Amino acid sequence: MTFRQSIITCLRKYFTFSGRASRSEYWWFFLFNILGGLFFSALEGFINGITGTPDGPTLLSGAFNLAIFIPGLAVGFRRMHDTGRSGVYLFYPMIAIVGLLTFIGFVGGVEALEAGNPLAMMEGALGIITGIAIIVVALSPFIVLFWLTRPSEPGQNQYGPNPTEVHP
């Protein structure tokens, strides 16, 4: 799949969270998101420099990011499906962060942070558990990245036919 085909496919499947997406479809669309964000940010910087408002509004890049958020999430779900995993696995880093913050809240770590003594929550068994949780949170984005780079499952899986074997 080419860069252009990927953009067209992902925008046509704006709200399609079912099915599968090839690696090329996902990563070309990912590149499009980055390039579009950079373009609109640079354009806003240029416009704000001309108007003399260096901290001016970011309406263009904000609108672009908002418009591309749902298709980006949808293609991420389809990409995870292509590797045989649920699309919900994309949220693994966020779930790990919420779990860590909840744990810290339950064990009284918030008080230690507010008192200016964050090392107090790293003492004893709770410190070991907190340390392990911090490592899990730090590694979770890399785990999801690893899953997104895996090759397609051959043939059909529970999410549909292999996108590289099916031609429209």
Image (spheres, rainbow, N blue to C red):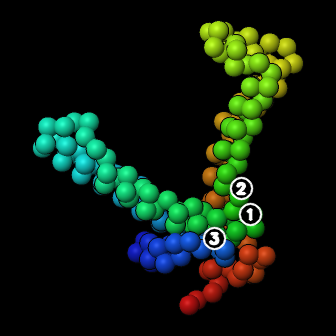
Mark 1 and mark 3: span between their CA atoms? 11 Å
Q: What distance separates the C-alpha of mark 1 from that of mark 2?
A: 6 Å
Q: Does the CB distance between marks 1 and 3 fall below 8 Å?
A: no
Mark identifier at residue 86: 1
The residue type indicated by label 1 comes to Ser
Q: Which residue is mark 2?
A: 89
- In the image, residue 138 sits, relative to residue 41, either above or below, namely above
How far across and how far down the image is residue 136, in percent? 73, 37
Query: Is residue 47 shown left or right of residue 158?
Result: left
The kind of secondary structure element at disc 1 is loop
Q: Residue at x 59, y 74 (%)?
A: 16
Q: Residue at x 70, y 38 (%)?
A: 98
Q: Is residue 52 above or below residue 72?
A: above
- Mark 3: amino acid: Phe
Q: Residues within 10 Å of mark 2 (few under 14, many from 20)?
A: some
* Label ID, residue 17: 3
Q: Position of residue 37 (x, y in %)?
A: 37, 54
Image quarter of residue 118? top right
Rendered location of residue 108, percent (x, y) = 77, 18
State the residue at coordinates (65%, 9%): 115
Could you tell me which residue is drawn at 52 percent across and 72 percent down?
Answer: 14
Mark 1–mark 2 CB contact (< 8 Å): yes
Q: Nearer the viewer, mark 3 or mark 2?
A: 3
60 or 141: nearer the eye? 60
Dividing the picture into quarters, in which one does residue 111 lie? top right
Q: Which mark's residue is nearer the viewer, 1 or 3?
A: 3
* Neighbourhood count class around disc 3 (C-alpha, 10 Å): few under 14, some 14–19, many 20 upward: some
Q: Would residue 127 be visible to someone looking at this image?
A: yes
Provide the secondary structure element on which disc 2 rests. Answer: helix
